[in-house]
Amino acid sequence: MALPGYPTIDYPEALLLGAVLVWLYLRVVRIRNLWRGMLLVAGILLLAYPSLVRSTESVDLFVLADRSRSISEEGRAKEMEIIDLLLQRARPGDRVGIVSFNQRAYLERPLSEGGAHSSFNIPYSEDASDLDEGLALVLSQIVRPERARVLVLSDGQYTGPDPMRQAQMARQNGAPIFYRDLVRAELYNLAVRDVVTPDKLLAGEPFRVVFKVHATTATRGRYRLLRDGHIVGRPESQGWREHDFSAGENQLEFRDVVEQPGLHGYRLEVETIPRERETLLSDNEAERYVEVVGERPLLLVNHTGRPDNVSRVLSAGRLAHHVVAVERFRMSIEELSGYSGVILNNAPVLGLTLRQLEGLRDFVTQEGGGLVVLGGNRSFAAGGYYKSALEPILPVSLEDRQQSKKVSTA
């Protein structure tokens, strides 16, 4: 009777060791018997690890890979690793086909021998996982059910019809289905992903601060809010409030009114209950700054940078203002936006750069800022205003009329 295969050994070097042991046995052992010899030979054969390779028919393996959003990056890498391993271990005659699915099923690789699979090309949305359609597409590709095998790579979550009907059809056709679970390890993590606040607002203006907290799974936790480093809430609980976070995005909204102009920071801190349940803590807080502006002062630019007659008039009218020397005037349009207007009091602009003059011009034309230019021996044409970036926005002409008259008369 012929053997249904052929014998093989995994460790042929054990036979060399066995030959040495047999030689020593024959040379050293004086009292020999059949049983000892048989035990020695059996031990040597066991060390060589003999086996019988049976002849079997090749198989058609269909890999059904879940490419929906619920599969983590680790799970996607595991899918590629498994497919690469199957293609490498395929025997002559074995054929491998690959079907992916999310919103729809997609044939990535027709049933074929050899080759490699470098990436998935499924063009449909990742927001669904139609396992039923994926199994239906696999079953439509089976030609010989007796040699077909199906390997499902998924986390078990699906949308659409129940896939059990397709699984029963595969069983009736004699095509077994194998399953590899790609469910991600359950990690309890709370992460403050985003903060929504107005960038700038007026003093005394009510506003909202919205923190977006992402939870990997529904969990019990707590949070607290800090404004400018000070805890907002009950001091006995250090500001902590318990909260049931649902899986996915959670929004925590706070309302506030600030009277003091300036930059004010709002920081949210979150943690699970108990705190030891969470391992990743680096994303458990986020902070955002809000600029609160009061009544914007005037900027008085003069030659000296010291109070003058104009500043005394402004003070008498209780108008907030700052005084700066023209040679120290280095403000951009962003910095000038903190002022309601600029007063140039007999201030020459000969020492200012083109960018500074354009910034002042844009402050008036684009931001709606006010501009007052007061004359003197250092102002207007004598101060370098003529043909500068400021001349187009001045309500007066800086042309020397006497010089123009001489030229025309000549």
Image (cartoon, rainbow, N blue to C red):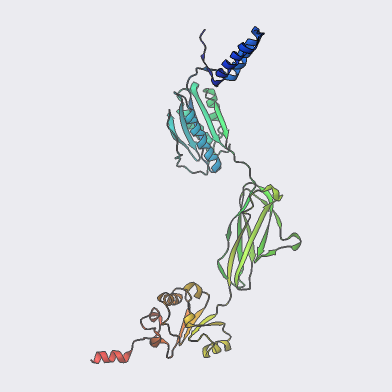
Q: Looking at this rendering, what residue extends furthest in the right direction? A: 236
Q: Find residue 63 and report its horizontal and vertical position in percent.
A: 50, 32
327 vs 70: above or below: below
* Closer-to-camera residue (246/16): 16
369 vs 197: above or below: below
Q: Find residue 267 and report its horizontal and vertical position in percent.
A: 63, 61
Q: Find residue 67 and report its horizontal and vertical position in percent.
A: 51, 40
* Closer-to-camera residue (385/153): 385
Location of the C terminus (image quadrant): bottom left
Residue at the (47%, 27%) spot, across then down: 90
Displayed quadrant of residue 253 = bottom right
* Closer-to-camera residue (40/59): 40
Q: Looking at this rendering, what residue extends furthest in the left direction? A: 410
Whether residue 244 is visible? yes
* Closer-to-camera residue (39/81): 39
Residue at the (63%, 70%) spot, across then down: 258
Q: Find residue 240 and report its horizontal and vertical position in percent.
A: 71, 58
- Tell how many labels: 0
Displayed quadrant of residue 17 = top right
Residue at the (52%, 28%) spot, across then down: 150
